[in-house]
Amino acid sequence: MLELAVEKREKIGKASKRREGGKIPAVLYGPKEPAMPVALNESDFIHVWNEAGESAVIELTGLGEPKEALIHEIDRDPVSGKIRHADFYVIEKGKKIEVEIPLVFTGEAPAVKELGGTLVKVMHEIEIEVMPKDLPQEIAVDVSNLVDFDTQIHVSDIAVPSDVTVLTDPHEVVALVSEVKEEEEEPTEAPDLESIEVEKKGVKEEEGNEDSAAAPAEESA
C-alpha cells in the first residue's frame, strides 16, 4: 500500500505561501472522521496520485495512528494545471467501500478486424463495493466477443473477482461495434436549358418595353 505523510494545518488561510514552500493544502474526512485540514508535500502527492489515482487505497501517516484513505477529489489551477487542493476520504475500518473503478479494454473485436467496424466504448468505469484490502485498481473488459454489429457487452458480462460486488446496473451497455457507413453523394440535377432560355427571353422583352416607353417622352421634349 502506498504511503503519504501529512501534517495538520492549524491555520486555514495563506494557501499561496504554503504552495510556494512546496506544500499542498488538503482536507481529510470520513464516516467516523471529522473534517481535518492538513498539508502535504507536493512532489510526494503527485507521485502517489500518478500511482494510485482515485481507485487505490493509500495510507496517511503523520497524524498518530495511520489512516487508510482514498484520494476523493483534486482541484487544479485552470491556467497552469497545478494541483491546488486535495480531498481524502478516510475509510472506516472493517467496512466495505463504494468506489468507481476504471475499465480497461483488452483483446480485439472481430467486428472491427474483419468487418471494418468501429469500437464504441460506452462506459469507462463502473461502481463497485468491496473491502479496502481487495480493491482492484482497474477491471478488464474483453472485447473479443464482439463478433458482429448486433453483439453488445453489458455490465453483467464483465468478469470481476468474487469479493467484488458490482453496483452499476447490469443491463447497462459497456461496449459495442458500430458499422461504418459511407455517405452517398446526392445526384446533381442537370440544369433545365429551356427554362434558362425562357428567362433570358423574358428579360430581353422587358428591356425592349422599357425602351419603347421612353421614346415618346424624348420626342415630345
Image (cartoon, rainbow, N blue to C red):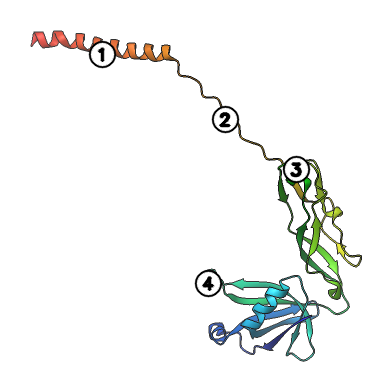
Q: In which quarter of the image is the N terminus?
A: bottom right
Among numbered discs 2 and 3, the one appearing first in the sequence = 3
Q: Which residue extends farthest right?
A: 162
State how far apart marks 1 and 3 are (Cα).
Answer: 67 Å
Residue 203 appears left or right of 78: left
Disc 2 element: loop
State how far apart marks 1 and 2 are (Cα).
Answer: 41 Å
The reply to whether dot 4 and dot 3 touch (C-beta < 8 Å) is no
Crowdedness near tag 4: few (<14), some (14–19) or many (≥20) residues, C-alpha within 10 Å: few
* Residue situated in front as seen by the camera: 180 or 204: 180
Among numbered discs 1 and 3, the one appearing first in the sequence = 3
The numbered mark at residue 114 is 3
Q: Nearer the viewer, mark 2 or mark 3?
A: 3
Residue 73: x percent and y percent?
68, 72
Check disc 1 and give the amino acid type. Glu
State how far apart marks 4 and 2 are (Cα).
Answer: 46 Å
Crowdedness near tag 3: few (<14), some (14–19) or many (≥20) residues, C-alpha within 10 Å: few
State how far apart marks 1 and 4 are (Cα).
Answer: 69 Å
State how far apart marks 4 and 3 are (Cα).
Answer: 44 Å
Crowdedness near tag 1: few (<14), some (14–19) or many (≥20) residues, C-alpha within 10 Å: few
The reply to whether dot 1 and dot 3 touch (C-beta < 8 Å) is no
Check disc 2 and give the amino acid type. Glu
The reply to whether dot 1 and dot 4 touch (C-beta < 8 Å) is no
Residue at which label 2 appears: 185
The numbered mark at residue 80 is 4
Residue at which label 1 appears: 207
